[in-house]
Image (cartoon, helix red, strand yellow):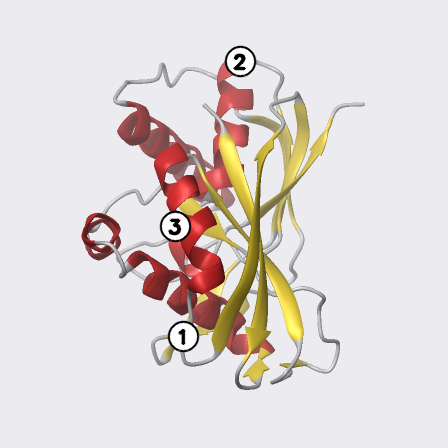
Amino acid sequence: MKIYELKVKVFLLKDIPYSKVLEKNAAFIDVTLGKDPRWAKMHETNGVKGYSLGGLMPIERKGIYHEGRIYEFSVRTVRPDLAEYLHIQLADTKSNEIKGLTAEKKIISKKMIQRIYSLTPVILKTDRGYWRSYESVDFFEQQIKNNLIKKYNTLFHTKLDENFTLYTQIKFDNEKPVATPYKNVKLLGDKVTMMISNNETAQELAYLSLGCSLGNMGSRGFGFMGYVYYK
């Protein structure tokens, strides 16, 4: 398994408020995928997409990303063919708000990961809404682990042994739910830091999370993860 990262430089055609950045970045990627029938079909199908994306950089402290300025954001994927397609197409994509300029591709080194941490809110989809309203932290932890296992099994057509410890410590970095607008509703998520266990399966899934997000809706920009290697 390799995680491919594309650093995409973009030019803003309109102002984008901070609260709408993930939605607009995802829409930009959707336009790119829509150019090719194969990737358009993948985009329209429910299931594991195998990619994730982050927000615009540098961060605008006053909450508005400005029309006429150049920013950068990252797209990651575990799919080599998708990485190649995006590498070619992203610089030639234009949405209503964003125009692509350049895209640089690299492989994220596969080293021992000490910890991963949320750069965008982690979303845990349930039938009853935000999990904290009716479930325990144990529920959150188990669902996050199950979600990573499902992604791995689906992408690599295998079945992992689920008897392993994913992390030695988890910390919630938000005191209250992080609300993000999405399709006229506000999704509630969390910022977390996880100290990753040093067994092989935990390390493999932590690496996978860098490309496919932690939790749900990675292709919408949620659960995009930062990482720190062991020194």
Image spot of residue 191 (x, y percent)? 60, 54
Q: Mark 2 falls on what kind of element?
A: helix
Q: How crowded is mark 2: few (under 14 residues within 10 Å), some or many (20 or more)?
A: few
Q: Nearer the viewer, residue 60 or 132?
A: 60
Q: Which numbered disc, 2 or 1, marks the residue that appears first in the sequence?
A: 1
**Quarter containing the C terminus:** top right
Q: Quadrant of residue 158?
A: top left
Query: Count the marks: how many?
Result: 3
| Residue under the image location 39 percent in, 40 percent down | 143
Q: What element carries label 3?
A: loop
In the picture of the structure, the residue carrying the numbered disc 3 is 216
Q: Nearer the viewer, mark 2 or mark 1?
A: 1
Q: Assess whether mark 1 and mark 2 are in contact (beta carbons under 8 angstroms).
A: no
Q: In this view of the protein, which residue sits in the foreground, 64 or 9? A: 9
Which residue corresponds to the image point at 36% horizontal and 28% vertical from the top-left?
Answer: 152
The disc, 2 or 3, on the residue closer to the chain's N-terminal end is 2
Rendered-image quadrant of the N terminus = top left
Q: Which residue: 48% across, 32% down?
A: 208
Instruction: Measure the alpha-carbon separation of dots 1 and 3.
Output: 24 Å
Amino acid beneath label 2:
Glu
